[in-house]
Image (cartoon, coloured by chain):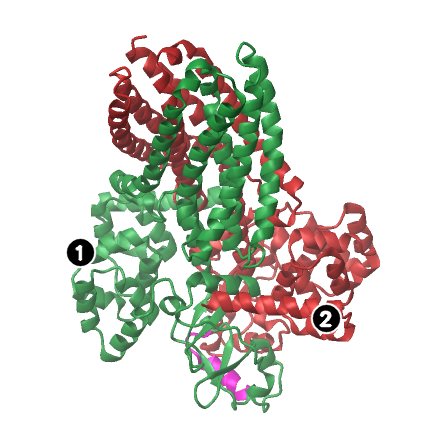
Chain colours: A green, B red
Amino acid sequence: MRKELFKHEVTILKDTFGRLLRRHAKTNLKKLIKKTHPADLAIVFRYFNDDEQTQIFELMQSSDHTIEFLVELDDTLIQKILNIKSAKRVANLIQNASTNDQSYILGFLQEKQAQSVIDLLNKEEQEEIEEIMGYPEDSAGSMMATEVFTLYQNTTCGDALKTLQDQQDAEMVFYLYVTDEDESLVGVASLRALATTQADILLKYIMEKRVHSVRPETDQEDVAQIVAQYNYLAVPVIDSDNRLLGIVTVDDVVDVIREEATEDFFQMAGAGKDREILLKSSWENAKVRLPWLFASWIGGIVAAYIIGKYEHMLESIIALAAFIPVIIGMGGNIGTQSSTIVVRGMATGRIEIGNEIQVLLKELKVGLMLGALYGIMLGLFASFRFISADPMLGLVVGLSICSSMLLAAGVGTFTPLILRKLDIDPAVATGPFVTTSVDILGVLLYFMIAGLLLTI
Amino acid sequence: MRKELFKHEVTILKDTFGRLLRRHAKTNLKKLIKKTHPADLAIVFRYFNDDEQTQIFELMQSSDHTIEFLVELDDTLIQKILNIKSAKRVANLIQNASTNDQSYILGFLQEKQAQSVIDLLNKEEQEEIEEIMGYPEDSAGSMMATEVFTLYQNTTCGDALKTLQDQQDAEMVFYLYVTDEDESLVGVASLRALATTQADILLKYIMEKRVHSVRPETDQEDVAQIVAQYNYLAVPVIDSDNRLLGIVTVDDVVDVIREEATEDFFQMAGAGKDREILLKSSWENAKVRLPWLFASWIGGIVAAYIIGKYEHMLESIIALAAFIPVIIGMGGNIGTQSSTIVVRGMATGRIEIGNEIQVLLKELKVGLMLGALYGIMLGLFASFRFISADPMLGLVVGLSICSSMLLAAGVGTFTPLILRKLDIDPAVATGPFVTTSVDILGVLLYFMIAGLLLTI
């Protein structure tokens, strides 16, 4: 119900913008832009054509609202609208943004353009941006907020509370991080503890000393894992001297979790990892999906070659051809099930180093159970329907289904496990490899079993 | 790097527990339990056998730590350890938990057992629990925290600040919700605004009046969507009279997002939706995966029947059989790509009502591009390799690949779109339907094209 309402609101917004754009009602457009939540504006923006997008963006001022809009905008769109702007306009727009928003936005510009923008900002900001941009993509360092509220460990609770109240960004304060004289992170205090402790007690006596922290080079997926597991609102990022560099906040982690899930989905299906694939042209879309299809094309060629080798057998028992689809189809499906369970299990931490063998054995057992069941069912069908054919056909078909499903479950489980060991993202390579190898192995097994059991 | 460290910690914890368990060192175990973060304990718990799990759980006291542990524990495990406990022990464990944690935990008990536990709690709690348990599963109502900090709109900022400092659960205060005399939600104020406004100003003058809220029956996915889109830390849940019933907090939303992604993954592969499938027995595992495989078995039987119908054609051109795998394989793969992109696009809000036709046309275009490319490549291969066969074979194979890929892209896109229109979860039904129908249609197209172009 709520979903429909929500979509309804977006539709109304879209229509209102459309009407005002057609009438070139600049003043009203400016008002509407200001009134619209930046996140909503970012969504509505997807539905405008290039010209409309430029018109609206032209009307936007240098403000927090605009920054938030840019940060929420799809990568493809931010790239499109910013790269045609002058460095001066971009610098003007982002000058008051936080350092991590600045470097996020600059990341979408061509290198030369980004440098011109950076040159226009003030010295201090330049250094901070360059530091953030120096961290690897998708790391804690590249997504952390550097403006963190910290307190000194020998501050009293009373003073801490006063400082907190004067804090401009108090709504951003999730935890009170406590440091020592060297600015090393030594603890964290909760707002509750602060408010319910006598005013003259020092922070160091009430703070929690065990703090989960990450390094700037920690991968964003691992940061997300920690936030999700411990229900944190923020995780501190520290350097090798334990100095607090920034915090990664839960709202960014929410985005990471959604994005990573989408990327894994697409990669498993061999459709790239671009979450904005729908914003791209058909040709770009096709290009991304081409490689996996090539793998499966090669697999098909090899299967054709194998079948060609057994031409003489097919000539005498033509009914064999009829069961090729079901044998590779069932194998492919159970293989996909196994690999999906394993890839996702690794992403969510359910499959750890150490329980791989157990997982593999379980999947093989499942493969055998399902293989035996469907093998018997298909074998019976084959015997009755093709009663005129060789009486052994049912046995051949049943055994083939059973063994190809067992094998597929094994390949589907083993492939992502071994890819992780080799430090290759299992989501990327599992899909193509599993389906292609299951196709080939299924056909090969089928004709080998037929060769053994059928008399030609 | 961090990931490994993290896993390393879990391994150490596992070993330490194991050692103490073998030595029956109860006092040390109790200490270790207390010292271990509940979330870590929940993870380590997966690795213990039934007996060890019971032993550890026996040693746990009625405390916030135990509640947190239970809430973090896998569904399968919480069910297992609680259902063998007496109602009295369970009531004792959960008596001090928040209402939503209580009802969450009670949800895992058998109905009779849950009722016995509820009967042991005090009257007020009983009513609250029954209210929460009355909301549909996976709704905002079932996951909201009912203990919310609210302020009256005619309170001054100074008084508000004082009340806030006395708040026991101050660390849970994400936003300051403001109500009128009827307890209706009328606005929200930020901590920052409160702290930087003169003490005698009334809340109603500084609060933001537009508040995004949800209803208790709103689906958890929609709640997650709102939290993710607007970067909220919490969303208020209101009834039809605008009265504040509770809030859904971001940490629960993080869990929802992860869980929903995993469920969609599994469902797309026809492996059920049980995130804890690895904790289940092989037979339970097999049972869940059986239905999709049955769909694909039926598909295989139909394909066998179709091929049987064209037996006479196969008899004269045996080479036709060799290309069956590649034709259904390529079709299946591109169909999976399209349906993955569409299912995920709908889940993340990128495919809205209104742009479906556009998406379908784009996917068809992609299907045609890739189909033409691989059709030509396969056609050439077929002509050269099977030069002795009918010279038209290359054309037949090429055309078949092209048309089956175009068709598969269409079916892969259309199926989830139409399922959503029919209010069926696209993730559940897309996988089985798409692969099965693509198998059948691919084979049918292939032999029809062969029948038209080849002279037998």
The residue beneath circle 2 is B20
- Tell me whether marks 1 and 2 sit on the same chain: no
Q: Is residue B427 left or right of residue B314?
A: right
Total of numbered circles in the picture? 2
Of all chains, the one bearing label 2 is B
Does residue A196 appear in the picture of this structure?
A: yes
Residue A344 placed where, x, y %?
A: 51, 50
Q: Residue at x 23, y 49 (%)?
A: A25
Q: Give the label on residue B428, or none.
A: none
In the picture, residue A287 is in which quadrant? Answer: top left
Residue B413 placed where, x, y %?
A: 39, 33
Q: Is residue B158 above or below residue A273?
A: below
Most frequent secondary structure within the magenta stretch: helix
In the picture, residue A296 is in which quadrant? Answer: top left
A168 is within the stretch colored magenta: yes
Circle 2 sits in a helix, a strand or a loop, which is it? helix
Does residue B217 appear in the picture of this structure?
A: no
The residue beneath circle 1 is A84
Of all chains, the one bearing label 1 is A
Residue type beneath disc 1: Ile
Which region shows up in magenta?
A157-170
Residue A258 placed where, x, y %?
A: 45, 53
